[in-house]
């Protein structure tokens, strides 16, 4: 590889909307919906097509966590380290980004369960809606060893884990941004491998497969790896042509290894290359369509499980009472997937985005948080 294609310099590719990073954001959110919905098909896709539909959840979560660290580092690293945004303002801004939508979805699910029970249609799997599991989930503490969080809107564990990462972010960058870019990249890889060995030794789990109650332990090494990739991207220029080929080959490599088995470490390498490559390709012609679909990705992530429970709760009752043929059940399944996308776009348009605009205005009105409100919104992290 010619060294001219990879060199340390100050004018690296800036992060921007409407390009490949935004496209990845929407693609990953869409695959998360498919992963969550596959088990509700008349024949689960993991059984009828390929096991990757089931095990792909760990891949998408890894992508989500690395991507969040990458984007937040590139957007907020300079302002936080330079003092233009305090650690408290950063944490407040991030929590206010995820908490309102999370609470709305969690309480909506509670209302759905209560209404269904009152109308004589209680959940067919009541163990997924145990009331003693709900408080930890609503408070987003289920990833820190606090009992609870199983069932209900279970994917919110990753939002809980990211809140811990937000707390660590300002302290991590103090050390990370003093490192040379290649050393930072090596630190991210070594930290993940070390965390993996420690969790195997102490808990008998690889770090990417930690139980939900240890979600923060799972998330932090991946989030840190994303931060290291971002610091590398800010200091090392990569030829767009090289980045394009690297991204394509990494995507092919990821699909190939997943066809055969999980291959966690190899998959993690390919995911890292894809994110690094996407960030190195300049956005010369921003796509408004890609940008629009990307900004809805958080709503897609936080709402799809609630839509799945509501839709297939009703579809299951209809299938059993009306003896619907399998072809009709497949049709209902496909409509359920579509409903998840439609609901997410409507939720973003009418609920999440207006709430966030109000929050930004309130933050701007606060003297101590004006810097927090002025920093641009992240481009690609699914957590907003």
Image (cartoon, grey):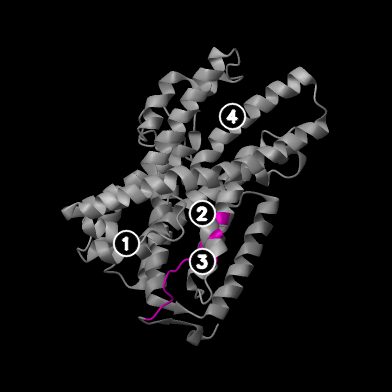
Left or right, 274 with reference to 194: right
Mark 1 or mark 4, which has the lower sequence index? 1
Which mark is on residue 63?
2
Left or right, 121 with reference to 326: left
Which mark is on residue 326?
none
Q: Nearer the viewer, residue 306 or 262?
A: 306
Q: Nearer the viewer, residue 167 or 218?
A: 167
Which mark is on residue 18?
3
Query: Which element carries disc 4, helix, strand or loop?
Result: helix
Q: Quadrant of residue 342?
A: top right
Q: Quadrant of residue 95?
A: top left
Which mark is on residue 310?
4
What residue is pinned by disc 1?
76
Q: Tell me, yes or no, whether the highlighted magenta stretch contains residue 368.
A: no
Span shown in magenta: 11-26
Q: Residue at x 22, y 66 (%)?
A: 82
Q: Marks 2/4: CA distance?
A: 27 Å
Q: Residues within 10 Å of mark 3 (few under 14, many from 20)?
A: many
Q: Nearer the viewer, residue 349 or 118?
A: 349
Left or right, 73 with reference to 117: left
Q: Nearer the viewer, residue 287 or 189?
A: 287
Q: Residue at x 52, y 21 (%)?
A: 113
């Amino acid at each position: 590889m010619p060294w001219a294609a990879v060199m340390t310099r100050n004018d690296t590719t800036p992060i921007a909307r409407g390009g490949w990073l935004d496209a990845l954001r929407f693609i990953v959110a869409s695959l998360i919906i498919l992963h969550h919905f596959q088990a509700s098909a008349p024949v689960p896709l993991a059984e009828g097509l390929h096991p990757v539909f089931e095990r792909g959840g760990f891949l998408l979560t890894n992508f989500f966590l690395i991507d969040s660290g990458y984007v937040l580092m590139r957007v907020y690293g300079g302002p936080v380290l330079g003092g233009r945004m305090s650690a408290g303002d950063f944490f407040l801004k991030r929590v206010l980004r995820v908490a309102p939508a999370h609470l709305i979805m969690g309480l909506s699910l509670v209302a759905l369960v209560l209404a269904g029970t009152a109308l004589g249609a209680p959940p067919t799997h009541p163990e997924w809606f145990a009331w003693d599991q709900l408080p930890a989930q609503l408070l987003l503490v289920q990833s820190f060893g606090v009992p609870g969080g199983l069932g209900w809107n279970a994917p919110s564990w990753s939002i809980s884990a990211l809140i811990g990462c937000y707390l660590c972010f300002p302290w991590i960058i103090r050390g990370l941004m003093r490192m040379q870019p290649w050393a930072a990249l090596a630190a991210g890889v070594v930290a993940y491998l070390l965390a993996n060995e420690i969790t195997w030794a102490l808990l008998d789990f690889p770090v990417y497969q930690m139980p939900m109650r240890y979600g923060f332990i799972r998330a932090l090494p991946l989030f840190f790896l994303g931060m290291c990739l971002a610091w590398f991207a800010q200091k090392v220029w990569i030829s767009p042509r090289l980045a394009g080929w690297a991204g394509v080959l990494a995507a092919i490599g990821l699909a190939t290894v997943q066809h055969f088995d999980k291959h966690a470490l190899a998959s993690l390498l390919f995911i890292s290359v894809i994110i690094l490559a996407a960030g190195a390709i300049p956005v010369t012609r921003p796509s408004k369509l890609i940008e629009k679909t990307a900004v809805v990705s958080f709503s897609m992530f936080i709402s799809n499980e609630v839509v799945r429970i509501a839709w297939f709760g009703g579809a299951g009752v209809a299938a059993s009472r009306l003896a619907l043929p399998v072809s009709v059940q497949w049709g209902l399944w496909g409509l359920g997937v579509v409903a998840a996308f439609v609901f997410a776009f409507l939720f973003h348009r009418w609920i999440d985005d207006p709430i966030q605009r109000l929050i930004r205005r309130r933050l701007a009105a606060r003297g101590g948080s004006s810097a927090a409100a002025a920093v641009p919104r992240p481009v690609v992290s699914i957590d907003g």
